[in-house]
């Protein structure tokens, strides 16, 4: 997995992004927030740019700080019909401080 932080501190309104490892075989990256609702918005999407050799394009994770507090953001690969990721994932403790 790409080198991701175990902890992250953001100010309200700040956004953090990270390039994730390539996924394949029907797997895509997903971001799940564990904790109080509304502290952060977390999502994954295809990275911008051309499709790589073999027809794959990387994924990017984005976390936007909405209000002060702390949550865990779990990034994991899974297929669209699965509700939880496999062993290839990581949790990031995100702390949002006031601006």
Image (cartoon, rainbow, N blue to C red):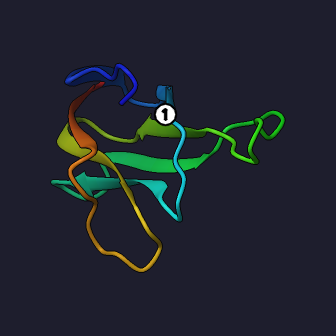
Expressed as whole percent of the image width and height from the top left, the position of residue 57 reads 69, 42
Q: Quadrant of the N terminus?
A: top left
Q: Quadrant of the C terminus?
A: top left
| Tally of marks | 1
Identify the image quadrant of residue 48.
Answer: top right
Q: Nearer the viewer, residue 32 or 57?
A: 57
Give above or below for 88 relative to 95: below
Badge 1, how many Cα within 10 Å: few under 14, some, many 20+? many
Q: Nearer the viewer, residue 76 or 52?
A: 52
Q: Nearer the viewer, residue 61 or 96?
A: 61
Q: Residue furthest bottom?
A: 81
Q: Looking at the image, which residue is at 79% across and 41% down?
A: 51
Give above or below for 87 relative to 98: below
Q: Residue furthest front?
A: 54
Q: Nearer the viewer, residue 22 or 30?
A: 22
Give above or below for 35 relative to 93: below
For mark 1, give the secondary structure.
Answer: strand
Left or right side of 71 for 42: right
Q: Looking at the image, which residue is at 49% across and 39% down?
A: 61
Q: Which residue is mark 1?
A: 20
Left or right side of 52 for 34: left
Expressed as whole percent of the image width and height from the top left, the position of residue 21 reads 48, 34
């Amino acid at each position: 997995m790409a080198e991701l932080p175990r902890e992250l501190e953001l100010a309200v309104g700040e956004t953090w992004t990270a390039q994730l490892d390539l996924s394949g075989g029907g797997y895509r990256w997903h971001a799940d927030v564990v904790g109080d609702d509304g502290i952060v918005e977390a999502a994954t999407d295809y990275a911008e740019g051309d499709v790589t050799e073999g027809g794959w394009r990387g994924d990017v994770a984005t976390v936007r700080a909405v209000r002060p507090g702390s949550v865990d953001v779990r990034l994991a690969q899974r297929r669209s019909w699965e509700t939880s990721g496999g062993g290839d994932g990581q949790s990031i403790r995100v702390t949002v401080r006031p601006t």
